[in-house]
Image: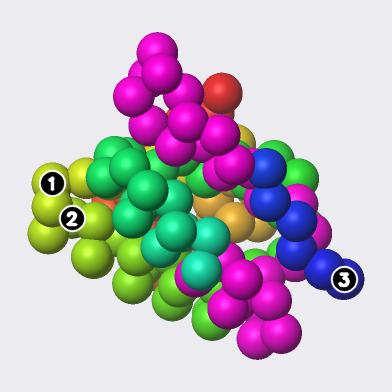
Amino acid sequence: MALEFKKKYDDVKKRWEIALRGEIDISTVQSLKETLEEAFRERESDISLVLSDLEYIDSTGLGAIIGAYGRMKEKGKDIVLIKPSATLKKLLAITSLNKVFVIEED
């Protein structure tokens, strides 16, 4: 399955909102990396990843998000994970990434 993005800047929250739909794996991870980098280059601000329609993410996808987070953190910015599935929340807890990322339910 493909990976689709809806990207917009939220002027109220002063951060990017990028909704992900589909699957993030070795075949789609490059487009995720490019989307995150493009948004941050366009406007250096926090990024919200809306995950409610994300069906699957593998280690390459998590690695891409962690890599972007590291580069953004150097500039004092964060990645916020919005509405991750129960499975993804469990994976974040197992890997202790729930202590790294801000997670919002809405």
In the displayed orientation, state which residue is furthest to the top: 12
Q: Are marks 1 and 2 in contact (CB under 8 Å)?
A: yes
Dot 3 crowding, Cα within 10 Å, few <14, some 14–19, many 20+:
few
Left or right: 15 in relation to 45:
right
Tell me if residue 4 comes above or below residue 60 in the rendering: above
Q: Nearer the viewer, residue 19 or 104?
A: 19
Left or right: 89 in relation to 21:
left
Q: For the residues marked 3 and 1, what is the alpha-carbon distance in whole angstroms?
A: 34 Å
Looking at the image, can residue 43 be seen? yes
Q: Which mark is residue 1?
A: 3
Give the amino acid at mark 3.
Met
Q: Name the residue: 67% across, 43% down.
A: 6
Q: Which residue is mark 2?
A: 73
**Whole-percent x, y for residue 91 in the image:** 53, 63
Of the image marks 3 and 2, the number of the one nearer the N terminus: 3
**Whole-percent x, y for residue 73 in the image:** 18, 55
Magenta region: 7-33
Tell me if residue 32 comes above or below residue 14 in the rendering: below
Q: Which residue is mark 1?
A: 76
Give the amino acid at mark 1.
Gly
Q: Are marks 3 and 2 in contact (CB under 8 Å)?
A: no
Q: Name the residue: 34% across, 24% down.
A: 14
Q: Give the secondary structure at mark 2.
A: helix
Q: Name the residue: 33% across, 42% down.
A: 43
Dot 2 crowding, Cα within 10 Å, few <14, some 14–19, many 20+:
few
Q: Nearer the viewer, residue 48 or 16?
A: 16
